[in-house]
Amino acid sequence: MVTEQTKNQQSENTEKSDKRQTTGVYVYGIVPADVEPGGDATGVADGKVDVVTDGDIAALVSEISVNRPLGRPEDLRAHANVLDGTSRVAAVLPLRFGAVLTDADAVKEELLSAHADEFAAALQQLEGKAQYVVKGRYVEQVILREILDENEQAAQLRDEIRDKSEDAGRQARMALGELVNNAIAGTREEDTRKTVEALGDLTDSVNRREPTHEEEAVHVAVLVDVDRQDGLERAVGAPAEEWDGRVEIKLLGPMAAYDFVVTQNPAGQG
């Protein structure tokens, strides 16, 4: 005889089974177990951010439909926002974008328990620290004038193509473009060195990033104690003041330590 209670239990089991088939758990990163997401923290696909704990460590997670493709710009922003927001108040080990596990038990067993010692040690090293990025771009007309003033060959090529048609001056224009790019690369190397030098002993680690634009002047990620942010801002302000009108420079952060401790996704995920 099938009772009403049995029917309800069967219905509940069916709902749970369907849920397991249609949803997964998106994992952002690893944090100390006492971290609590803000009530308004929003993750990928507008998911509510929660934590799965195991001993002294935890994972920042949110529920997501397994049928929903990942990779939209808003997904990437949400992933970064969760991690960067957390980095302001606690150490966080970011996972690469796209880590999805089947459920909270899998997060606990396959991720947290399996790497507990590794994660705990990394979190201890990151305690009180966050990543900042110093990024600067040359003012185009200023850097070009600087190169033409300092490089006789570039000035000659500029004069050579001044009154020529596009076709007639094609080779000279190509040669000038290559020369300018090489000159900017050399100047970038020197200006990056000066920037890192200006930071002095504020940073624990420095990663010189590849340029993302041909007129990029500086692009470095640094790992810094968050309580030294004011000192970092002053240090970055020194070259910014020196290069006023020549380089547009900005300091980004605090953010998660992507350049220094990004963990791999769980095997077979992401």
Image (tube, rainbow, N blue to C red):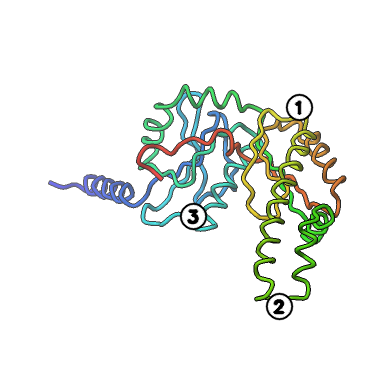
Spatial separation of the CA atoms under disc 3 and disc 1: 41 Å
Which residue was labeled with disc 2?
165
Residue at horizontal 26 percent and vertical 49 percent from the top: 14
Q: Nearer the viewer, mark 1 or mark 2?
A: 2
Give coordinates of residue 53: x percent, y percent. 47, 31
Give coordinates of residue 180: x percent, y percent. 72, 56
Which residue was labeled with disc 3?
45
For marks 1 and 2 on the same chain, the one whose residue lies earlier in the sequence: 2
Which residue was labeled with disc 1?
201
Quarter of the figure with residue 159: bottom right
Quadrant holding the C terminus: top left
CB-based contact (under 8 Å), mark 3 and mark 2: no
Vertically, is 250 above or below 228? below
Amino acid type indicated by mark 2: Ser
Give coordinates of residue 223: x percent, y percent. 66, 33
Element class at badge 2: loop
Foreground pick, 254 / 20: 254
Amino acid type indicated by mark 3: Ala
Q: Nearer the viewer, mark 3 or mark 1?
A: 1
Vertically, is 220 above or below 205? below
Amino acid type indicated by mark 1: Asp
Residue at horizontal 72 percent and vertical 46 percent from the top: 186
Residue 229, which numbered label? none
